[in-house]
Image (cartoon, helix red, strand yellow):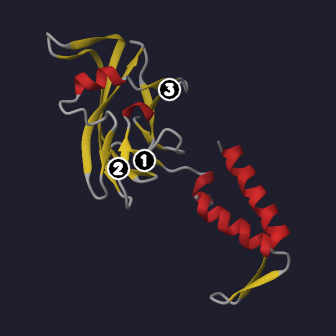
Amino acid sequence: MRKTTTLALIAGALVALGCGAGSTDDASSGTAETGTEAAAADAGKKAGSGKNEDKPKTAKVGQPARDGKFEFTVKSAKCGVSKVGTSMLGTQAQGQFCLVTLNVKNIGKESQMFDGSSQKAYGANGTEYSADGSAALYANKNAETFLNDINPGNQVTGVVVFDIPKNVKLAKLELHDSPFSGGVTVSLT
């Protein structure tokens, strides 16, 4: 995905170079930038690139972490659960369920859909695990983590469920405001 963003920035800069050869004045700072530099700076701002993109910030349990329009706060992570739901309606883990309770707040200016299946977990060896959407339906009373539209300023608390092998311990989560966002890392260790 970074390659696509980089290619888009380069293409934008080349188009700007062809369309706006010469220099422009930046009256607010008293400096001059060439058309290419200005286009690259604008493209970088729009793409959200910057110093922090090279060094992603890792949050811990209890600390807010932002990705796109969402602010995530992981409340707890409980592994070793063999079944979620009731005795009549539920599902059994293939290995063990890890129940991650998190608060999701919309910090944007428009409604955004939270999808628990866009969230990822990683073991200590770097193995990636996807969320178990069907198990999450049993773990949540009101389907808080299943395609839930959250309006600006509102927040929900729900459980995202991961079905992982019994001998695995989760090391971190990668939380996303959409399936294609860059994500933010939350350490569980």
Q: Residues within 10 Å of mark 3 (few under 14, many from 20)?
A: few
Q: Secondary structure at mark 2?
A: loop
Per the model, the C-alpha gap separating discs 3 and 1 is 16 Å
Q: Residue 30, position in %: x, y?
A: 69, 90
Q: Is residue 112 above or below residue 141?
A: below
x 31%, y 35%: residue? 145
Give the image quarter of residue 117.
top left
Task: Looking at the image, tell me whether mark 2 or mark 3 is earlier in sequence order.
Answer: 2
Label 1: which residue? 59
Badge 1 amino acid? Ala
Q: Is residue 171 above or below residue 59?
A: above
Question: Would you say 65 lies left or right of 2 here?
Answer: left
Q: Nearer the viewer, residue 4 or 16?
A: 16
- Residues under numbered marks 2 and 1 in contact, where contact means CB atoms less than 8 Å apart: yes
Badge 2 amino acid? Gln
Residue 63 numbered tag: 2
Label 3: which residue? 124
x 35%, y 25%: residue? 133
Q: Is residue 18 above or below residue 34?
A: above
